[in-house]
Amino acid sequence: MEKVIDEKKQGTSLNIEPKKENSRKLFIESYGCAMNFSDSEIVASILAKEGFNTTQKLEEADLVLVNTCSIREKAEQTVRKRLEKYNAVKKTNPKMKVGVLGCMAERLKEKFLEEEKIVDLVVGPDAYKDLPNLIDEVEAGRDAINVLLSKEETYGDISPVRLQTNGVSAFVSITRGCDNMCTFCVVPFTRGRERSRDPQSIVEEVNDLWKKGFKEITLLGQNVDSYLWYGGGLKKDFKKASEIQKATATNFSQLLKLVAEAQPKMRIRFSTSNPQDMTLDVIEVMANYPNICKHIHLPVQSGSNRMLKEMNRLHTREEYFKLIDYIRELMPECSISQDLIVGFPTETEQDHKDTLSLMEYVKYDFGYMYAYSERPGTMAARKLEDDVPAETKQRRLAEIVKLQREHNHFRTQRFLGETVEVLIERESKKSNEQWSGRITQNTVAVFPKEDYKVGEFVNVKITDCTSATLIGEAVGYSENN
């Protein structure tokens, strides 16, 4: 994966305030998407009730868990290297148990437990509530596995602990699974069908986060625009629901409105959207509520209609442009980011040029770009030959990354001379004399600390920029404080 601007964490170990009564220690690392990091918070909450405090010291852990991603081959290679590290440490601490969570666990369950024998337990994304039983099985000397998929939102009643938090921003899961069978994607097979969470429980969680001092939340799901609550169950069963259930159902735009109105000073973000499911009323709600951040992550994957059809993306290039145009019309200030796959099977030079021309039309603020890697079990792996040479993939990827960097700089330059609202999140990575935070468009801004503190909204006048970062000086507190 090549990334431009917005950084995704590659692996984070998590730690929370220990409970004195807990005697065992849990070391947990997360890789991949934001949903994995959110799930790790749920796991830590479940295990805290079973006597585990989290630790950041691998060597002292009684239980080591890695929450995994299967979306790219590189992600799986990274996890395998971590498992080698865990098992090397385990030789000096025989009581240590090692487990794999998440999408990679579901996909490689037998291989990990039976063939390679490198883990003690394997737990799929919908089976975390079964962890106490699985740990008992391991401690009794038996391998433990549960990768069953649920037909309900499995963790709606669990209050996640906030791991390694800055106390400013938090994830709130609203959906799980995905019904969009993109031919390159393993998510429907590892996380199951789409199911949504009760909107009341979502609002309650947001209210609780506000009371605890959080200033920003991200509504999270594999495909948030497919959110639909009508009393529970799979989205595909909605046709069978009663007329009363249908009349009182809550879709994503309505949920967004509920959350925005519940906490008018809380910044609201959401991720991830699918162009075929994003409705115009979502954009209208965004435009009407100042606390909903003006940023949309809108993966397109390719600019070629032929490639989109091969990928089973149920939108065309032209439909994507209409969506972009509507966003620009209602929210000219809104930033847009992308996911793009380069070198998908049968991709031609013309297909590649179509992607470049789409990028020129949109001029994304930032994005995530990948060279296609075949994922076992997907429709593409079963039916399409990975026939684009590696060197061609890399050359095309380099061209796309180069163009995206140009667009990054174009987008950050628009803020020169402007005053923007920044939510302070942490100390700058490059200077301990500067704060770092994000503006509503999700662009990072840095400025001198002065007397400001983490979690405060500050107005910052932008005096300079790079392709990734806005640079400025604070001119006072925002009215949101």
Image (cartoon, rainbow, N blue to C red):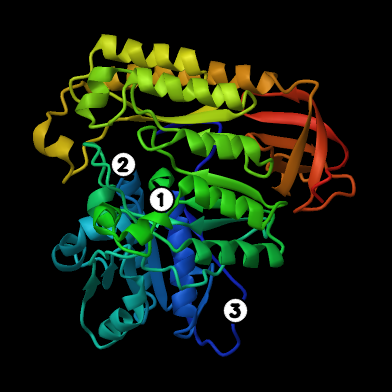
The mark nearer the N terminus, 2 or 3, is: 3
| Residue extending farthest left | 383
Crowdedness near tag 2: few (<14), some (14–19) or many (≥20) residues, C-alpha within 10 Å: some
CA distance separating discs 2 and 3: 34 Å
**Residue 325 x/y as whole percent:** 50, 20
What residue type is disc 3 on?
Pro
CA distance separating discs 3 and 1: 35 Å
**Residue 416 x/y as whole percent:** 76, 20
**Residue 337 x/y as whole percent:** 50, 30
What residue type is disc 1 on?
Tyr
The mark nearer the N terminus, 1 or 2, is: 2
Q: Which residue is mark 2?
A: 72
Task: Residue at 63%, 34% (x, y): give it.
Answer: 441
In the image, 407: left or right of 36?
A: right
The disc placed on residue 227 is 1
Which of 37 and 480 lies nearest the eye of the viewer?
A: 480
Query: What secondary structure is marked by label 2?
Result: loop
Relative to 408, does residue 192 appear above or below in the rendering? Answer: below
